[in-house]
């Protein structure tokens, strides 16, 4: 019992620490220590808890874009009980959080939100931002809702079952995340990216076991495992998400597929084996102790079946899993790290166990040859992060879901892809669906970013390499400038804060007015290699000239937002960010600039 209490205390302290940091860094407080959070008013603590949950748990569990997290916070006047809303293709996430309270009587109305949106019940009374989200939702077909009611208090299994029974629409997934689930999810996420467990021991007592003697040269064993054993496996704090480092599709939350699994588990557990595809795992080595009926696996990794294992593990303790049987195929492959190498068996098992759909996840794209080529070029050029002074922090290109390396600047392929697409193609597309960046179909954006004229390539030219990284560094420069401005302004009153991707697009439009493509690439190369234009400590003159480009675009955006507000009452930023009309208006304003009025970034003779 003492151990459980200790774990709860550790989580609460970590949560307070994160809320304390948010209060000081984002909300202008000057708290002296984490316990000072307890002295704040209830409304402020609620906002801090919401941001903690979104940043530390929700975003990482559901792989939601960081910008969508910031733009989806709508807990203001007339929010209709919605603290957060996000649209991810045909999925809508709605969150209500309760810090140090559990008013469960609000849940029935929360569950009815999708109907209220459809029937326009809130259309005339909700705030402008929500209205923009609702309008976007109503234009979509086959919408799936994921409703999350999050509380720091304990909710009983009986209470959760009762409120879950109120959901009648199969397109609505409802979950109560109480204190226990909060802690469990938080701890699981903290292990994401860790190396796989050195050894996993599977109990084969009262199970079926077949070692495949005709399969060579890689030994393979087929076993069954009771659901109760799999739940214990996942709940081992030493394992958790470390079991899935090489799995492409992580836990996706409750969806229609998982809902079907849950129904089988709870109503027909003896049929689960027949309905489920099972689990595929690889390991570096395994040893079958026949006397004790134990199977020891070194560097055990589930490469297909994360949904199966996690769905079983997340079943309430009161659900009997002893009659649930799961088939597991375990292959003795190569070393764990060879999961990155296309020639390895580990890589190809991962690839072929996760290739059922045309649209791949960001994790699956991480093994593409072009991503490996970018990673190798970063190492070859020994890039340093140019916004620091002196430029000493080595850059690591993060193409896989792993922990950041200390004392190095980690740049994810997600951030690179987004800034490139917004700077050179079309910002509204990313706000509408960031996941299309990883779609390799004709309707996707992946090869527009990492290809050649929309076609697949396996190598990257210097020109495209510098465009990729310059777009990200210019975005970081813009972010730094806006944060400086926000020390004296409120972000709700400063429109450019929400339009960072429009600003990098606008800066590129101004550069195209002033310079040839070859000259622009020269500028990008100096940004990436030397830090010119984005770091005043390195070259103040170049930074001051470049700042004029930033300043012009942010002023243009301010004026265009003001015009939109004059034309229509209660204009929402969401509608402007996702609308082509606003971008075209901004493009027309930029086109009015005369090249000779723009400052020289490349002095004559340079």
Image (tube, helix red, strand yellow):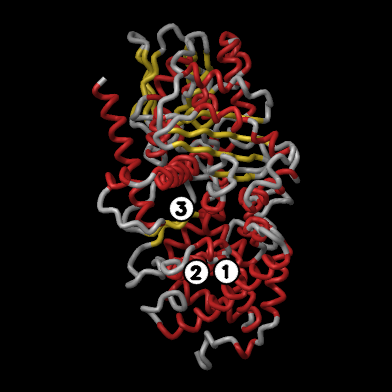
Q: Which residue is mark 3?
A: 398
Q: CA distance from mark 2 to mark 1?
A: 8 Å
* Position of 519 relative to 365 (above/below): below
Q: Residue at x 48, y 62 (%)?
A: 377
Q: Earlier in the sequence, mark 1 or mark 3?
A: 3
Q: Position of residue 574 (x, y in %)?
A: 63, 55
Q: Position of residue 345 (x, y in %)?
A: 51, 36
**Label 3's element?**
strand
Q: CA distance from mark 3 to mark 2?
A: 22 Å
Q: Earlier in the sequence, mark 2 or mark 1?
A: 2
Q: Nearer the viewer, residue 509 or 525?
A: 509
Q: Which residue is mark 1?
A: 504
Q: Position of residue 410 (x, y in %)?
A: 41, 56
The answer to whether marks 2 and 1 mark residues whose Cβ atoms lie closer than 8 Å is yes
Identify the disc placed on residue 478. 2
Q: Earlier in the sequence, mark 3 or mark 2?
A: 3
């Amino acid at each position: 019992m003492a151990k459980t209490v200790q774990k709860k205390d550790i989580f609460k302290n970590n949560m307070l620490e994160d809320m304390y940091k948010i209060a000081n860094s984002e909300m202008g407080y000057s708290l002296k220590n984490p316990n000072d959070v307890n002295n704040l008013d209830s409304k402020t603590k609620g906002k801090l808890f919401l941001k903690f949950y979104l940043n530390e748990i929700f975003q990482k569990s559901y792989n939601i874009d960081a910008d969508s997290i910031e733009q989806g916070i709508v807990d203001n006047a007339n929010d209709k009980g919605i603290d957060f809303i996000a649209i991810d293709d045909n999925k809508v996430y709605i969150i209500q959080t309760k810090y140090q309270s559990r008013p469960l009587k609000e849940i029935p109305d929360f569950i009815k939100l999708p109907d209220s949106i459809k029937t326009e019940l809130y259309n005339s009374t909700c705030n402008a931002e929500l209205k923009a989200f609702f309008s976007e939702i109503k234009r979509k077909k086959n919408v799936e809702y994921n409703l999350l009611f999050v509380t720091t208090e304990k909710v009983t299994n009986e209470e959760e079952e009762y409120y879950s029974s109120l959901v009648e629409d199969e397109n609505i997934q409802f979950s109560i995340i109480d204190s226990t689930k909060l802690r469990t999810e938080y701890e699981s996420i903290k292990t994401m990216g860790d190396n796989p467990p050195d050894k996993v021991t599977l109990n084969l007592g009262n199970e079926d076991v077949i070692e495949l003697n005709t399969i060579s040269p890689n030994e393979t064993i087929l076993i069954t495992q009771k659901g109760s054993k799999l739940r214990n496996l996942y709940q081992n704090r030493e394992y958790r998400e470390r079991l899935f480092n090489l799995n492409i599709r992580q836990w996706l939350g409750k969806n229609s597929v998982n809902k079907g699994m849950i129904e089988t588990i709870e109503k027909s557990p003896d049929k689960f084996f027949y309905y489920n595809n099972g689990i595929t795992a690889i390991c570096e080595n395994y040893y079958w102790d026949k006397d004790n009926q134990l199977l020891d696996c070194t560097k055990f990794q589930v490469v297909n079946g994360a949904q199966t294992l996690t769905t079983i593990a997340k079943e309430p303790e009161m659900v009997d899993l002893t009659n649930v049987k799961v088939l597991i195929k375990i292959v003795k492959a190569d070393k764990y790290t060879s999961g990155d190498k296309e020639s390895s068996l580990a890589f190809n098992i991962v690839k072929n166990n996760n290739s059922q759909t045309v649209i791949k996840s960001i994790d699956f794209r991480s093994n593409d040859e072009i991503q490996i080529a970018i990673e190798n070029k970063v190492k070859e050029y020994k890039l340093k992060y140019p916004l620091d002074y002196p430029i000493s922090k080595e850059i690591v290109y993060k193409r896989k879901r792993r922990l950041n390396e200390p004392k190095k600047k980690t740049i994810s392929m997600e951030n690179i892809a987004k800034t490139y697409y917004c700077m050179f193609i079309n910002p509204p597309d990313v706000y509408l669906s960031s996941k299309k960046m990883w779609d390799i179909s004709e309707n996707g954006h992946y090869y527009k970013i990492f290809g050649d004229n929309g076609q697949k390539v396996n190598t990257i030219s210097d020109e495209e390499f510098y465009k990729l990284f310059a777009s990200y560094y210019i975005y970081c420069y813009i972010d730094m400038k806006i944060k400086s401005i926000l020390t004296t302004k409120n972000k709700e009153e400063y429109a450019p804060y929400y339009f960072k991707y429009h600003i990098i697009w606008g800066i590129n439009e101004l550069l195209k007015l002033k310079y040839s493509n070859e000259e622009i690439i020269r500028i990008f190369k100096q940004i990436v290699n030397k830090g010119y234009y984005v770091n005043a400590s390195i070259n103040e003159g170049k930074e001051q000239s470049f700042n004029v480009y930033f300043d012009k675009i942010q002023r243009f955006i301010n004026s265009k937002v003001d015009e939109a507000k004059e034309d229509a009452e209660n204009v929402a930023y969401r509608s402007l960010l996702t609308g082509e009309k606003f971008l075209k208006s901004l493009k027309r304003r930029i086109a009015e600039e005369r090249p000779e009025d723009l400052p020289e970034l490349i002095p004559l003779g340079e």
